[in-house]
Amino acid sequence: MLEREKLDKLRWRTNQKSENIVFYSYKMSEHDHINEHEFKRLKHSIASLREFNNEISVYLFCDKPNLVPDNFKSEYSVFLRPFAQGFDHDMLSAWSIHRWYNLKSFQRRDCNILYLDSDTIFYEDVQYLFDTYCYYDVYGREEYGFRFDPNTGGGKNIRLSLDKVDEAIYDLGGRGAIYKYCCGVMLLNNNIHNYIIDSLGELTELMNDFKRKEQFYPIPNPRIVDQYAIWTIFSRLEIMGGLFACQDVTMGYKEQKHQEHFNPIVLHYTTKGEQELAKSDEKYNDLIRDIDSLGSDIDPYSVV
């Protein structure tokens, strides 16, 4: 049976009966000041989620769970877990691939999973995303500059660059068109996480090949290698994907369309918009910092 047919059978199952799960994944930095800042982000993200929903299961995976502040479990009702078995801390792609490996903790579990980066803030109930975006296998927003990103785009030669990305994915065995997701807020429905788990070997190989420059990497930003790799896996699996509406999942502190009407379910403010967010509301003032003191390690969108 083709992968497409298998997935279609899964899709028509009523996923309203499945458990809904939110999860975060953080690999500790060698730098204490980066870890301290990251835990501030996580605290704000989870606290804002809990402001509107105390029922949904929230998991935080960390490679050193003993260093996570105690109040994450007690105050925010978070299930704290170590990284899944089989994760190699020394692999080339360890810094970013851990979120996909930690899906193994939900293997063979009937659930819909919302993955969140730490640089997210909720303004409404997270349940809305599960209730509204429940048909397609995967939902997300497109990465900055790609065709369905409503922001400024990637410059005058963007169409040529996009065609190169599509061609490269097909050259790597892609079989279906796929949105170029930003993975900071991703909803995995229809037990699709099990297909990703089954493809972890392929995903790891792809990321390592890109890192070693043994495969063509058509994107100027090397910090989204893991995203390009997962797009390729999604295309190979012919996964049916959808997009979050930008009024529900907002990227950047305030997207152009929302300057007058800013009312998302969740804001993925990204490092680029963090200082504007931090200065706009006193409860986020502890995120104000000297970017130079943290370095580029904390910014997944900086080009190095």
Image (cartoon, rainbow, N blue to C red):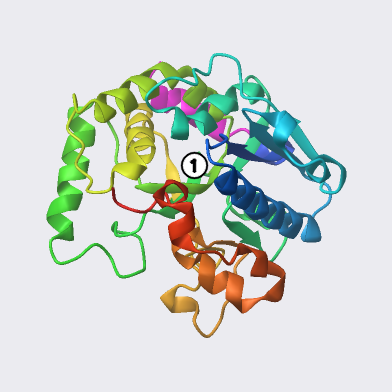
In magenta stretch: residue 12: yes
**87 or 122: nearer the eye?**
87
In the image, taking residue 135 as reference, residue 162 lies left or right, namely left
Q: Position of residue 40 (x, y in %)?
A: 66, 54
In magenta stretch: residue 57: no
- Name the residue rendered at 49%, 17% in the picture: 88
- Name the residue rendered at 72%, 70% in the picture: 283
Q: Position of residue 242 (x, y in %)?
A: 45, 49
In the image, taking residue 157 as reference, residue 233 lies left or right, namely right
In the image, taking residue 222 as reference, residue 141 lies left or right, namely right
Label 1: which secondary element:
strand
Task: Give, as a three-letter code, the residue at label 1.
Answer: Val
Mark 1 surroundings: few (<14), some (14-19) or many (≥20) residues within 10 A: many
Question: Is 158 located above or below residue 102 in the figure?
Answer: below
Residue 197, visible in the rendered structure: yes
Q: Position of residue 115 (x, y in %)?
A: 58, 42
**116 or 3: nearer the eye?**
116
- Name the residue rendered at 56%, 34% in the picture: 27
Can you say which quadrant of the picture contains the N terminus? top left
Give residue 74's quadrant in the image. Answer: top right
The residue lying furthest to the bottom in this view is 260
Question: Is 225 located above or below residue 263 in the figure?
Answer: above
User: Mark 1 — residue?
Assistant: 138
**286 or 160: nearer the eye?**
286
**12 or 80: nearer the eye?**
80
- Name the residue rendered at 61%, 43% in the picture: 114
Residues in magenta, as a range: 1-14
Q: Position of residue 92 (x, y in %)?
A: 37, 24
Question: Is 63 located above or below residue 298 in the figure?
Answer: above
